[in-house]
Amino acid sequence: MTRPTPSRRLAASLALGLAALGLGGCRERNITAYRIPKDADVQEPAPSPEQPAEAPQMRFIAPAGWQTQPASGMREASFLIAGPGGSTADVSVVSFPGSGGDDLANINRWRGQLKLPPVAAAELPGQIKSLAAAAGEFVVADMAGTTDKGEARILGAWLRRSDRVWFFKVMGPSDLVEGQKEAFTAFLKSVSLGAGPATIAQEGPGPSNTNDLPRNPPGAVLPAPAPGQAPMDSVPVQAAAGASLLWTAPAEWQVKPGSAFRKGSYSAAGAEVAITAFPGDVGGMLANVNRWRGQAGLDPVDEAGLSRVTSSFDSNGLHFVVLDASDGPQPLVAAAVPWGGATWFFKLTGPAAAMAQAKPAFLSFLKTVRAP
C-alpha cells in the first residue's frame, strides 16, 4: 500500500479541521481564569519551515452569560449562551495552521450551514466587514437563514496571522444571536496573542455602571458636588466585590448609557471616557500598557521600555500609571489604578482634535478619583 505523503496528510488534517468547524457553532468585571485544554485526539500537522509547531497562545474575555464548555475536537474554546424557553446558541473558537481558505470560501461555508445559496466573488464586499482590534484585523460576518430547528443566525469572524488563522463563531436561534452582537464585538476586541498558557477571562454578574444607579442611594451619605461639577459623580460604583471608587466628572461631560463592561461612561468634547475594573492585576502593567498601545496602533514595548512610555502620580492615596498615546494613529490616554484587590482602568479615546481638547480635563479628572 502506498503511504500518504506529508503534504497529503497535511491536506487531510486541514479538511478534517474545516469539517469540524462546520459542525461547531461559530467590559470588564469579575474575572475567573481557565486553562484551555489541548485535545489529545487532534493530530497536529508536522512542523515545517513555513508552519511553526507552536502557535501563539490566545487570551480573551468571555462576556457574562457565556457558559464555558469543554473544548473538544479542533476547538480551543467553547461556550454556551442560554436564551428564553430553553433556547441556546453555540460559541466556538477554532484555529488552523495556514490561511484557512479565502474569504469567499469561508463565507459560503457558513452560508451553507444556514441553507443560504453561495455568493459570487463580486458580492463578497457586501457580506463582510473589517474590525481593527489589539490582536489584528478581524474579518467579520453576520448572516441569517434557517436550519432544521428553524430561523438561525451566525455571527462569525476570522483573524489571520502569517502562518495561522483563528475562527470565532456564534450560531443559534436568530433572535438570541442578534442580541449578542455587542458582546461578540467586545469579545473579539479583547483577544490577545502571546506566549504562555492560553486563558479565558470570564465576566461575572452584578451591576455594571454608575449610570444604572440612583442619584441618591437609600441610606447613603454622599458629599455634595462642588459648584460647576456634575451631580452624579459622588455616586459609588457598586462593584460585585463590594466597595468601589468615587470620582467627580467635569460638568460639561455628558453621561452615556452603560454596558456590561463599564462602571462609568461619558462623552467629553467629542471624545469618550470609559471606566472599567477587573479583579487582580489583569496580567500586569506591561501587558495592559501593550494592550493599549496596540489599540492606539503603536508597537509594544518590553519591560525596559515601560518607564519610557508611561508616567505615574499619586493622588488621594491612590497610585496611577498613565499611558499617553494621544499621538498614535488611534489616539488614547489611559490610566490604571490598583485598589481593593482589583485594577481600575480609566480611558479616553476619540478623534485627534477631540482628544486634544478633552485630555487636560481628563488628566484633572483622574485626580478626583478617591476611595470611599
Image (cartoon, helix red, strand yellow):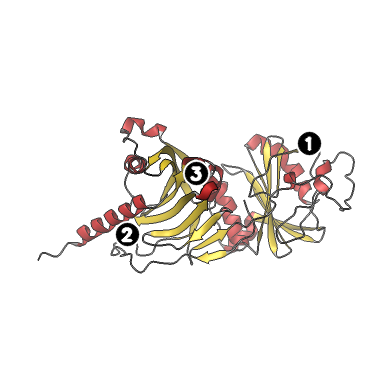
Mark sitting earlier along the chain (2/3): 2
* SS at mark 3 in the image: helix
**Residue occupying image coordinates x 55% and y 61%:** 302
Q: Is residue 52 left or right of residue 237?
A: left
Q: Dot 1: what SS?
A: loop
Spot occupied by residue 193 in the image (x, y as percentages of width and height): 48, 57
The quarter of the picture where residue 51 lies is bottom left
On screen, residue 60 versus residue 245, left or right, reads left
In front: mark 3 or mark 1? 3
State which quarter of the image contains the C terminus. Answer: bottom right
According to the image, label 2 marks what residue? 51
Alpha carbon distance from label 2 to label 3: 35 Å
Say whether marks 1 and 2 touch (CB < 8 Å): no
Judged left or right of residue 279, residue 142 is left
Q: Position of residue 280 (x, y in %)?
A: 65, 64
Q: Nearer the viewer, mark 2 or mark 3?
A: 3
N-term-proximal mark, 1 vs 2: 2
- The disc, 3 or 1, on the residue closer to the chain's N-terminal end is 3
Residue identified by numbered label 1:
252
Q: Closer to the observer: label 1 or label 2?
A: 1
Q: Quick one: 332 or 167, which is closer to the camera?
A: 167
Question: Which quadrant holds residue 66?
Answer: bottom right
Task: Measure the C-alpha gap from mark 1 to mark 2.
Answer: 54 Å
Disc 3 marks a residue whose amino acid type is: Val
Residue at position x 31%, y 47% in the image: 101
Give the amino acid at mark 1. Glu
Q: Which residue is mark 3?
A: 177
Q: Residue at x 81, y 38 (%)?
A: 251
Label 2 amino acid?
Gln
Local crowd size for mark 3, using a 10 Å CA cut-off: few (<14), some (14–19), many (≥20): many
